[in-house]
Amino acid sequence: MSVGATVVALSSTLYTSGIPGLQEEFGISKLKALFGITTYLLGMAIGCVLFAPLSELVGRRPVYLVSLTIFLLLLLPTALAQNIETILVSRFFGGLFGSALMSNSPASISDIVSDKHRPLAFGFLSIGPMNGPVYGPIIGGFVYQYMGWRWTNWIVLIIGGAVLILMIFIKETYAPVILRRRTKLKRIETQNRKWWTRYDHAQDLRSLLQISLSRPFIMLLTEPICIFWDIYVALVYGGLYLCFVAYPIAFQQERGWSPGIGGLSFVGIGIGVYIAIACEPIFRRLINHHQRSEDGRVPPEATVSIVGLGGTLIASGQLWFAWTCTPNVHWLVSIVAGVPFGAGNACVFIYASNYLARSYGIYAASALAGNMFTRSIMGACLPLAGPSMYGTLGLHWAGTLLGLVEVACIAIPVVFYFYGHKIRERSPLIKKMQVPVL
């Protein structure tokens, strides 16, 4: 799951390393070349609300296999393109089908891992999706410098092909689908139509699809938990993708580094992600020290404490980078600023996903799909504004503005830490899930 999601995340930012080559070959502006990121993330935004609920209907495994195969095939027109329009369209559909691995992987982990160990599992899973965007510039810088921009696509195709072979051996994990299949086999074996499961529905396929595909949007618009967490994570995600505009300016344009060496400037963010994942045992102890509910389980709000820590680290790293990223300060100081920034991003994504998964149970994929939809939209739009923002305000003040916004947003995890249990108690969907089936 992690390696599969890494391929999709890698493709999103590996593209940025080849933008100078696209500008030169097709005679286009940097802004038009950046549209390749926008169309990719827009495709992911649409795809996640399509494939996540679809996996709740037909199962995770078939969705993974079909979507990954089509994703890999769509790399061919991008690698062989003779104009920018072909690249933009191919990347849109590539993002659409690739989103299945990004949106459903956390749901698959939620299917098979207990509440106690889920943050650790999410941590291992997040090594790929979280560091995928970071690996992109690091790998892509050298690939573009020595092999050209087209090879940024061939590399993804080669890695993705190996992942597809591994994906064949993954079993189905979604409980309702597994139970419905067992029920069907029992009916055939016993010739008894009375075998049933609580997940049987009377609706036809069209009705089921309509309900499943509309659920992420309904949750996004009606569930306060989804509304606030989706906004928060979207802002964090947008700030992460603005790094792919700011870092090339700071290290390649201002300091004159080559594309390959410039890509290594993202190492700080990657190290921060690994540190956050390695600290999971410490975070687990902090979470387990919270007061337990009547059933002996730690409430979901306990995980929000780590999200609050992550939000603080993100804002600190952003402000640190904003005031140390110019040539008059040693380059190592600004790269180290990426460590708290990367660690904070990992904490937010891992533990916010865990909070949504624990809150919504069998509808975790739909909740996470809505979350991915909003953050993909934000990640698609903000990089387009990045060149103008950094050009007008400069690296110092543009980074400071982002840091202050991130400071203000810390209020969201703080409120949920203290009052999240009351918000969950008032959720109609969560109440419906808790009704016992007789």
Image (cartoon, rainbow, N blue to C red):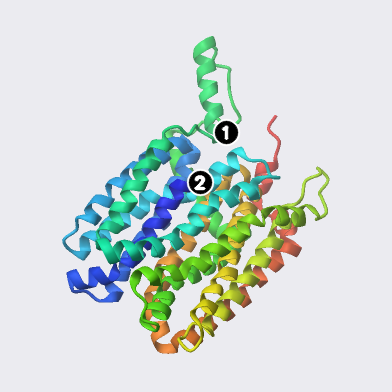
Q: Residues within 10 Å of mark 2 (few under 14, many from 20)?
A: many
Residue 135 shows up from this direction: yes
Helix, strand or loop at label 2? It is helix
In percent of width and height, residue 278 lies at: 63, 55
Q: Which residue is at 22% across, 53% downward? A: 77
The C terminus lies in which quarter of the figure?
Answer: top right
In percent of width and height, residue 281 lies at: 70, 52
Helix, strand or loop at label 1? It is helix
For the residue pair 72 and 40, the one nearer the viewer reads as 72
Q: Nearer the viewer, mark 1 or mark 2?
A: 2
Amino acid type, residue under disc 2 in the picture: Ser
For the residue pair 48 and 241, the one nearer the viewer reads as 241
Amino acid type, residue under disc 1 in the picture: Ala
- Count the marks: 2
Q: Which residue is mark 2?
A: 105
- 65 above or below 298? above
Q: Would residue 327 appear left or right of 423 to someone viewing this image?
A: left
In percent of width and height, residue 340 lies at: 60, 70
For the residue pair 238 and 20, the one nearer the viewer reads as 20
The quadrant in which residue 141 appears is bottom left
Label disc, if present, on residue 405 of the rendered structure: none
- 68 above or below 416? above
Query: Of the residues under marks 1 and 2, which one precedes in the sequence?
Result: 2
Q: Residues within 10 Å of mark 1 (few under 14, many from 20)?
A: some
Q: Which residue is mark 1?
A: 175
Q: Would residue 67 appear left or right of 55 to someone viewing this image?
A: left
